[in-house]
Amino acid sequence: MKYMMLMQFSAAQTDFPGIESWTAEELKAHIAFMQSTNEEFTRSGELVDAQGLAMPDQAKIVRADGGRPPVVSDGPFPETKEFLAGWWIVDCDTPERAVELAAIVSAAPGPGGRPLNMPIEVRPVMSAPSGEV
Amino acid sequence: MLARRFGDFEAAEDAVQEALLAAATQWPGEDVPRNPRGWLIQVAVRRMTEQVRGEQARRRREDLVAQRDGPRSAPPADAEDESDRDDTLTVLFMSCHPALTPTSAIALTLRSVGGLTTAEIARAFMVPEATMAQRISRAKQRIKASGIPFGMPAPEERADRLHAVLHVLYLIFNEGYASSIGPDLHRDELSREAIRLTRAVHRLLPGDCEVSGLLALMLLTEARRPARTGPAGELVPLTEQDRSRWDGAAIAEGVELITATLAKGAVGPYQLQAAINAVHDEAPRAEDTDWPQILALYGLLERMSGGNPLVALNRAVAAAMTHGPATGLATLDALDGRLAGHHRLHAARAHLLEMMGDRRGALENYRAAAARTTSGPEHRYLMTRAARLTAP
């Protein structure tokens, strides 16, 4: 069963300073942790994909109504209090295991090497039907 | 999970003999049943169930005696000639070892006895090749670390271990069958591979009724593949499939195999599922389906699986098709505790409420099922059913 783990940054739900204020060492430790975690998920035979996203001020929002030319608005968007920082797709035996994996990444090190305690949303990826309908 | 297969060959032969005797004494006076073969199967199965119950009671008594008298050695249940044992079988038993999770057993089986490369297995499961390679190598390490000696399982473990092998083959088949929707062609190689491996096991253990049953089940299910998705990749339910697109040769092979196997009488869960699929596949039109027979077979399967609630759910649907939706709904109500919130329970209830003409109830349950399924095609199917009901 595949699960997507969404690292949802939320100003309201986190209590660490923004990443722009971290020291070089803190950033290095964070990146090294993410890299070794992904290697670990590959070694356990569970990693499908993992990606980090560029900051939301790089985002564009596109809307089209099928007739007129699409409307494109550029970031940054002032109302962005929450944004998707990155995701993993893992393929594991049980939903409990997906929660375990999410807990690992939630505790990635942040400022002062302290675990970030980031909220990670775990969602099953739609799969094949479970039987004859 | 599933109960072990029924008793021995001799008992089975007796059951069939009795069924034939019952036929010989009843048919001259009564009308010959519409489906004599199905009728025979039912009678034989009923006799076997009675016998097994008696046998289980006797064994419980003997176990009590044995416990009182202390341990003693008994001959293995199904001692078999050493020469029958083949490398393929040994490797298969190792790859499907219960020390492995299903996911790793599946990967290791496909790599070690299947004809697929790691890249092909990775593609079939839609994971990167590096991940699949690690999954396979960890499975091997796990077996090594567990200290299980390489070789055939001991005779007393044999039935359980064969059951584990059949379960893994069944999972591989299902993975391929369930997910081969629309243009997603990579994955039907999994079903083909599962059938190929099951054929190999069947050649090595031709006398094992559950191996034959599993092979028949796969053939009879695979036969419907061409009709189970529509042009847009949407799921087509059994009752609405274009039966002219079913694979007649696969159905003939499956029906022949399950008929010959059931006649031996050592009935087990795979054989019953194959028999249910044979009844479906033999109906020229959906309305010709012999639902009373399917209902009887699900009844047996439910008892044999220790009251598995998903089997009970299928029995409720068969009961609805036999005795009307009200009966089916009453059966479903009894499952509320054990299957609470399961999307299949909502989906089944939705179908039966729709049959009864309860539009609102059906709509509510289709939506509840759609919200709970984690399958994309199933979600689209349920939403489409719901949308049909809201149309004026």
Image (tube, coloured by chain):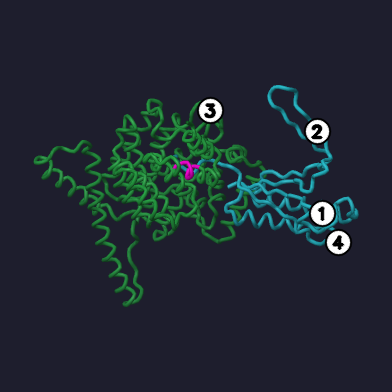
Chain colours: A cyan, B green
Gap between marks 4 and 3, in whole Å? 54 Å
Q: Taking the image as drawn, is residue B203 in sight?
A: no
Q: Secondary structure at mark 1?
A: helix
Contact? badges 4 and 3 (CB < 8 Å): no
* Residues at marks 1 and 2 touching, judged by CB atoms closer than 8 Å: no
State the predominant SS element of the stretch in magenta: helix
Of labels 4 and 3, the one closer to you: 3
Q: Which mark is residue A30?
A: 1
Residue placed under numbered mark 4 in the picture: A112
Q: Give how far apart the Cα atoms at labels 1 and 2 are.
A: 32 Å
The location of residue B173, given as percent across then percent down, is: 47, 41
Return the chain for callout 4. A
Residue at 55% of width from left, 29% of height from top? B183
Residue labelled with disc 2: A73
Q: Tell me the kind of residue under disc 4.
A: Gly
Question: Chain under label 1?
Answer: A
The three-letter amino acid code for the residue at tag 1 is: His
Label 3 amino acid?
A: Ala
Q: Which residue is mark 3?
A: B232
Measure the C-alpha gap from mark 3 to mark 1. Answer: 45 Å
Q: Residue at x 32, y 48 (%)?
A: B327
Residues at marks 4 and 2, CA–CA distance in whole angstroms: 37 Å
